[in-house]
Amino acid sequence: MHAPSLRPPRLILASSSPYRRALLERLRIAFDVAVPALDETPLAAETPAATALRLAQAKARAVAARECAAAPDGAPVLVIGSDQVATFDGLQIGKPGTHEKALEQLRTMRNRIVEFHSALCLYDSARDLAQTEDVITRVRFRDLPDAELEAYLRAETPYDVAGSAKSEGLGIALLESIESDDPTALVGLPLIALTRMLRAAGYPLFAGAQ
């Protein structure tokens, strides 16, 4: 007789981002979405990498604690947390929130190299183990006139993304070059690093594909 196969732990994406959800759907595995409630303000003297890694892990742990407490059987979960911080000249660039702030960001970044820190955490509640990684993408912005920047912002309204440019959409036209080990990192969820972490956690990537 064959031993019954063990079901993989419940996989949860700790994010409200539709972009991260769309990326995770590429892997064709079942997952749930839970939104963490955290203050994402950088700490005093905190580096961009430290901010991104801290928040990615905090999101994953917060959702794991909430979901495990709510589960009637206390079943373990695997939670994916991610955070992205853009930076240049040593300054962190957040989500603009408004058209005016987005335009100011794009003006400032013209013909400049911007580093995007896409931090990832996979938290395994069964082992209280967090795998973390900071994937860095270096982007050079084109030197475009205000009229083109205005037109882009009104077309795509990228006010909820760090750096005010959606590279997966029309925002790619703002960029001169992208340097990264993971083409998905800039969008917000580094899938190469994530699949490496899932394999290390024993998650059956291909067996669970739908």
Image (tube, rainbow, N blue to C red):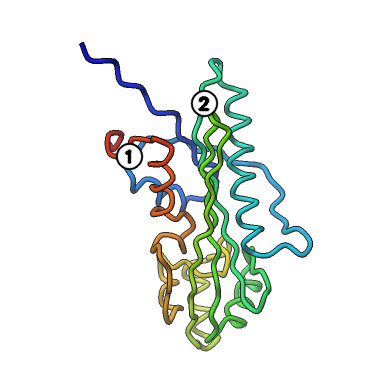
The residues bearing labels 2 and 1 have C-alpha atoms spaced at a distance of: 18 Å
Q: Quadrant of residue 46?
A: bottom right
State the residue at coordinates (40%, 62%). Answer: 182
Question: Local crowd at mark 2 within 10 Å, few (<14), some, or many (≥20)?
Answer: many
Is disc 2 in contact with disc 1, using a CB cutoff of under 8 Å?
A: no
Q: Is residue 64 left or right of residue 7?
A: right
Q: Residue furthest left?
A: 1
Chain-order first, disc 2 or disc 1? 2
Q: Residue 96 at x, y = what percent?
A: 63, 66
Q: Secondary structure at mark 2?
A: loop
State the residue at coordinates (59%, 68%). Answer: 86
Q: Residue 16 at x, y = what percent?
A: 55, 46
State the residue at coordinates (55%, 75%). Answer: 114
Q: Name the foreground residue: 154 vs 140.
A: 140
Q: Which mark is residue 205?
A: 1
Q: Quadrant of residue 202?
A: top left
Q: Quadrant of the N terminus?
A: top left
State the residue at coordinates (66%, 42%). Answer: 37
Q: Is residue 70 left or right of residue 189?
A: right
Q: Is residue 188 left or right of residue 6?
A: right
| Circle 2 residue | 76
The residue under label 2 is which amino acid type? Pro
Residue 179's place in the image compared with 134, above or below, is below
Q: Residue furthest top?
A: 1
Q: Quadrant of the C terminus?
A: top left
Question: Local crowd at mark 1 within 10 Å, few (<14), some, or many (≥20)?
Answer: some
Residue 69's place in the image compared with 107, above or below, is above
Q: Name the foreground residue: 179 vs 199.
A: 199
